[in-house]
Image (tube, grey):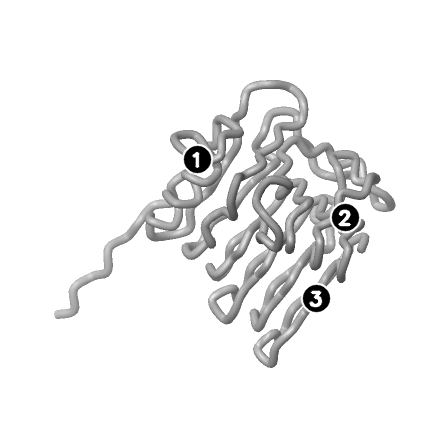
Amino acid sequence: LLAASPVHASTTFTVTNTNDDGAGSLRQAILDANATPGTDAINFAIPGTGVQTIAPATALPTITDPVTIDGYSQAGATPNTKAVGSDAVLKIELGGQSAGAGAIGLKVEAANSTIEGLIINRWGQGIRINGPDGAGVKVAGNFIGTDASGTQDLGNSSYGLFIDYSPNTTIGGTTPAERNVVGGNDGQGLFVAGAGATGNKVVGNYI
């Protein structure tokens, strides 16, 4: 008889501060999610009513195990409801201004992960979906290269989004809530490269 594989329930890790590392930080949440098999969630419950800016001193860990990072879990955040335009209210800003030249905001090498509801600016690359392990990643409802209003230029220095050899990703979607706003980036807003980058969908965004 074949031994049954262990079943791992989804685990939620909660970011409770804007610190660079340590308990309650985004860095620690990514490390914990990477170390926990199965598709986990990273939510936010940072005290305060305004935009909460996380500005790591160095690049964050590569995401290597499937996870949903949900900026809309922060109190006061709401997705876009407009068929034309965006009235999304985003409360979690991931800024690369202190991380060093060329650092990547979120590097994803975990199939079927989701990144949503974040403001990602001032990195070398905002989001990089990397290699075949990045298959099926979804990026929805983010502001990439702008401030929290979605109107001011805080561009990433090269790519807003870089899909590198990863297949079957989805950038945006068919509903207003899934719309990404990508602007102000100093290179391409969205760059897709590599023979393996097939079956990708870019739908319903402002780029």
- The residue beneath circle 3 is 191
- The residue beneath circle 1 is 21
| Residue 66 x, y percent position in the rendering | 44, 54
Cα gap from disc 2 to disc 1, whole angstroms = 28 Å
User: Disc 1 on helix, strand or loop?
Assistant: loop
Quick one: which residue is furthest to the front in this view? 101
Image quarter hosting the N terminus: bottom left
| Residue 133 x, y percent position in the rendering | 47, 66
Lower sequence index among marks 2 and 1: 1
Kind of residue sitting beneath label 2: Val
| Residue 135 x, y percent position in the rendering | 52, 66
The residue drawn where x is 45% and y is 50% is 61
Lower sequence index among marks 3 and 2: 2
Quick one: which residue is furthest to the left in this view? 1
User: Disc 3 on helix, strand or loop?
Assistant: strand
Say which mark, if any, is on residue 181. 2
Residue neighbourhood size for the residue with mark 1, other residues' Cα within 10 Å, grouped as few (<14), some (14–19), many (≥20): some
Kind of residue sitting beneath label 1: Asp
Between label 3 and label 1, give the one nearer the viewer.
Answer: 1
Look at the numbered discs 3 and 2 and tell me whether their residues touch, using CB distance below 8 Å: no
Kind of residue sitting beneath label 3: Phe
Which quadrant of the figure has residue 177? top right
Image quarter hosting the C terminus: bottom right
